[in-house]
């Protein structure tokens, strides 16, 4: 594997007294798309939040470009070059598409201007003046992903971008992820839908009870189908 851009080692995380992450370890090479797969409550979202510095209590090691981030705050982690697109999307309904795109601060050199984002997301340009409330679920998801490119992040953490979307829109999200990868972004994707995951990712980490129990290269997914069904309970 090429040099790891992100290296997570023995990561622990807590919500209050609840110990949720029990030694998560995984790594992501520059330019890869990697998924965290697992059942509801396995700790996938919590892992993303811990990497982003959004959990009040965490321990272990999160190295990004060789730099240790475990004790940094989320704004410092954003400046290091990581951005998260949360499951709830966080689109402001009363603001236009353009206004939503202008919200995230450009915390780092290389953060995209709105025009550059429109070049990557031509559909959003067409909807530029539309209010958040007027967008379909798929358009909102596109906007939520597009918006984090403002920050200048190189590593994008996408939390269940396909959730609740119709199959044809899920395909569009897949195209978006492949397009982002071609444009040099590295992506960690939380997914429940492994059929979708198989169309976009290089490797899959299976998460259970707050740690990684297996890693399956995408090319080996078919051969591991039965095992995976057991892991995911599908
Ligand atoms: P899902 O697909 O349901 O989001 P997940 O694998 O992402 O699953 P997490 O959301 O990371 O799972 O949740 C892991 C565990 O942490 C669950 O037991 C959940 O109940 C608990 N948890 C999540 N958020 C909180 C919170 N804010 N406070 C307390 N416990 C939480």
Image (tube, helix red, strand yellow):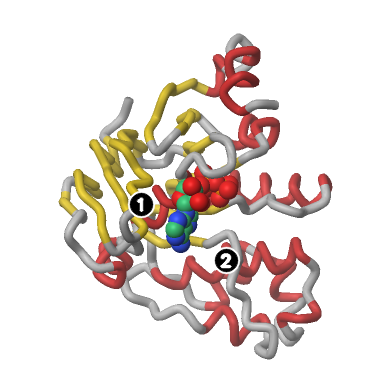
Which comes before the other along the chain, label 2 or label 1?
Answer: 1
**Residue 138 position (above or below residue 220):** below
Q: Is residue 194 above or below residue 132?
A: above
**Res. 181 visible in picture:** no
Up the image or down, 225 lies above or below 130; here it is above
User: Quick one: label 2, few (<14), some, or many (20+) residues within 10 Å?
Assistant: many
| Label 1 beta carbon within 8 A of ligand 1 | yes
Residue 25 drawn at (x, y percent): 31, 34
Q: Is residue 95 left or right of residue 136?
A: left
**Image coordinates for residue 145, horizontal then vertical, percent:** 57, 62
Q: Which residue was labeled with disc 2? A: 146
Q: Residue at x 46, y 33 (%)?
A: 207
Q: Is residue 58 above or below residue 34?
A: below
CA gap, disc 2 and disc 1: 33 Å
**Farthest residue in the front direction?**
17
Q: Quadrant location of residue 80? A: bottom left
Q: Quadrant of the C terminus?
A: top right
Q: Nearer the viewer, mark 2 or mark 1?
A: 1
Is disc 1 placed on a helix, strand or loop?
A: strand
Place of residue 9 in the rendered image (x, y in percent of width and height, measured from the top left): 24, 37
> x, y percentage for residue 84?
45, 61
Residue position for label 1: 18
Q: Is residue 115 visible?
A: yes
Query: Mark 1 packing: few (<14 Cα in 10 Å), some, or many (20+)?
Result: few
Give the residue displayed 74% in from the left and 85% down from the top. 131
Q: Residue at x 48, y 66 (%)?
A: 149
Name, please, the residue furthest toward the top: 223
Q: Nearer the viewer, residue 26 or 44?
A: 44
Q: Secondary structure at mark 2?
A: helix
Q: In the image, what residue occupies the spot 47% across and 37% down?
A: 34
Closest to the observer: 226 or 189?
226
């Amino acid at each position: 594997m090429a040099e790891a851009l992100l290296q997570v080692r023995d990561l622990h995380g807590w919500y209050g007294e609840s110990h949720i992450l029990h030694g998560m370890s995984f790594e992501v090479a520059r330019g890869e798309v990697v998924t965290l797969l697992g059942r509801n409550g396995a700790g996938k979202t919590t892992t993303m939040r811990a990497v982003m510095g959004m959990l009040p209590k965490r321990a272990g090691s999160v190295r990004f470009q060789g730099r240790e981030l475990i004790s940094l705050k989320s704004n410092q982690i954003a400046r290091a070059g990581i951005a998260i697109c949360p499951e709830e999307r966080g689109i402001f309904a009363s603001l236009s598409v353009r206004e939503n795109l202008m919200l995230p601060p450009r915390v780092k050199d290389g953060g995209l201007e709105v025009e550059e984002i429109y070049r990557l997301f031509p559909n959003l340009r067409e909807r530029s003046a539309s209010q958040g409330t007027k967008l379909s679920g798929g358009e909102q998801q596109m906007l939520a992903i597009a918006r984090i490119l403002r920050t200048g992040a190189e590593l994008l953490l996408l939390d269940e971008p396909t959730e609740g979307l119709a199959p044809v829109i899920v395909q569009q999200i897949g195209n978006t992820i492949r397009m982002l990868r071609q444009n040099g972004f590295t992506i960690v994707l939380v997914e429940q839908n492994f059929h979708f995951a198989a169309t976009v990712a290089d490797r899959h980490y299976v998460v259970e009870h707050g740690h990684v129990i297996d890693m399956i290269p995408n090319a080996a997914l078919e051969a591991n189908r039965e095992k995976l069904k057991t892991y995911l309970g599908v």
